[in-house]
Amino acid sequence: MEDLWRDDAAEAMVAAHGDLGERIYSARLLGADPRLVLHGGGNVSLKTHMKDTLGEMVSVLRVKGSGWDMASIEPAGLPAVRLEPLRSLRALETLGDEDMVNVQRLNLLDASAPNPSVETLLHAFLPQLYVDHTHATAVLAITDQPDGEARCAEVFGETMALVPYIMPGFALAKAAAEIAERNPQAEGLILLKHGIFTFGGSAREAYGRMIAQVSRAEDYLARCPRKTFKLAALPKNPRPPHEIAPILRGLASLPIDADEGLYKRFILDFRGGEAIRTYVDGAEVKRYAKIGVVTPDHTIRTKNTPLVLPPAAGDFAAAAKAALDAYGADYRAYFARHENGQTALDAMPRVMLAPGLGLFGLGHTAGSARIAADIAENAIRVVTDAEAIGAFESITEAEMFEVEYWSLEQAKLGKGPAAALAGRVVVITGAARGIGAATARAFAAEGAEVALLDIDGAAAVATAGSMGGLGLACDVTDGDAVAAAFARVCGHFGGLDILVSNAGAAWQGRIGEVDDGSRRYSFQLTCFAPQRVAKCAVAVMLAQGMGGCLLFNASKQPLNPGPDFGPYGLPKAATIALMRQYAVDYGADGIRANAINADRVNTGLYADGMLEARAAARGLTVADYLAGDNLLKREVKPEDVARGLVSLALANKTTGAILTVDGGNIAAAPR
Ligand code: ZN
């Protein structure tokens, strides 16, 4: 493992952050390497001095706050806790977790600071100025063995002191401090089946020791004779991930009220690649994948074990359902074996291993699905190495339960009220600009995951990037391109729940005189393309079995035609018929279909003189056409149409309907 410390970079951080500079610098170096820590795992500290409110210098521990990621840590992520009161806790025999958190909070210099790390007391009880803690994969591969202690003694010798497995908290902090005192020569601690601490008088020293000790572990792994996994005989040509993901998503999502079509939905993050395939395709995958977590921290993100899926062939849906039912039964039995008054968490896996394909991470947002998949990849690295040199061994089931149902770990998951559309996947066509882009933004703001399709792929990617969505090039008049885009969406998110068919363009011309070519293309884009995307969306929705929502941008023209706009309005009329047909044919499947009738929205559709021409066709100035001609006297903006579409997505009992967004217009005669 390379030592990435650069003096000039460290000095720049000192210039920016004073005496916290080097602490922040090496924390970020450690946090950026997934072989050391992942997603909020690990922690660091510095013992220093600060002025309190009375202006008196007090010694403080600056320790990583809960919820902060080392890779992107800032001074605010290192709350200052008075050190002496923390140290005096060592005299206690026991200290409950809630009491520990309480006393840590009472001693914060800033009452609004985040909770100090659950491993704060361990940092406080060690005397060194700088303490670094990671869950390095190479170290875990050696300690997670039946003879892990002996192997560690061989690898690290006197340079590291060994601490037996104890759940994080007061007892571990006390034991670790005593062991460190008995081994004054040690430059750090190996916490068996958990991770590694190094310490030093400077950030440079603690970081350098972390890299050197983890490198020792890596060298040992490279030196050991290695066994490799025997591969299972799997069916040739399995169904691809994007085909099985919607089935899994439907099976895994948790019904809130299935009769009402309400589910707590999962997003699925798929990963392939050689290391993952070697692991999931192994003949013994059900043995080594089911042993347990590689470090206790992972339990809350991935549960103790993944689900091993049946091969993606034959009647996959039935076999996957049986596998999930068995996983749920096992989980409930595990809970019953260990509970003493806790409330059971849901019994769904957060990682699914798909032999012949790869793995899926599951979460209620794309972000948490990605974290689950990252952790699963990390665990695969550890277990692969551990099995290569010996036999992987985890903490006991009771110890895993203790961590999974530990109130302090549960707090890390942050249980704010879920956004209205959290867990829903929305596909929007024509999404790079105008109404499409505003719609994507509105859905993302409600917590949905958004996929933006546009004929201008670069613009779709750029617009999607600004809201954490997926941007794809897609010409909706091209059937292959549409199929490929939906496969990408399902591969990326695991499925979809809402389609907004928005792509369009406008043509004018007196209906008796328009040329057939432009009228035909108008039908291609405005009628056949919505049918093509709706068909793809419905196929995915049926595979999920959780209903769905189709939304079409229909415009005002088919309902209240203006002169010389037939080439635009005719296919839009067909879009409304299409919407109603979907509502009729798929209502029993819980799939709703609705349209929006938006009028006079000044977007790219009105470019190149179109706006002026349409205003003239209604006998109005441009200003009156846009705002002066409706009841509210307000211009309708893309954001207003977007809000209408979100409302239709939420209107759970509305189907076959047209929602008007035009500023109000009750005149009977066409205007
Ligand atoms: Zn830890």
Image (cartoon, grey):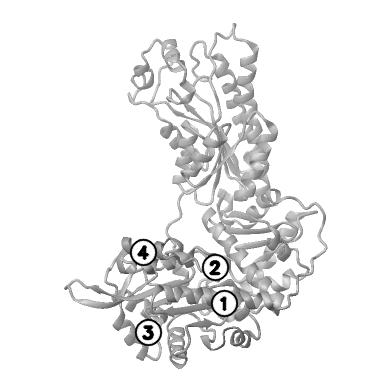
Mark 4 C-beta to ligand 1 under 8 Å? no
Distance, label 1 to label 2, CA atoms, is 33 Å
Q: Nearer the viewer, residue 441 or 597?
A: 441
Mark 3 C-beta to ligand 1 under 8 Å? no
Task: Name the disc covering residue 11, or none.
Answer: 4
Task: Name the disc covering residue 127, or none.
Answer: 3
Q: Amino acid at mark 4?
A: Glu
| Disc with the residue nearer the chain's start (2 vs 3) | 2
Instruction: Determine which residue is flagged by label 2.
Output: 2
Would you identify the image quadrant in which residue 643 lies?
Answer: top left
Mark 1 C-beta to ligand 1 under 8 Å? no
Using the image, determine if residue 571 lies above or below residue 462: above
Could you tell me which quadrant the N terminus lies in?
bottom right
Which percent across, then down, holds residue 292?
63, 74
Q: Residue at x 65, y 28 (%)?
A: 477
Residue 545 visible within the image? no
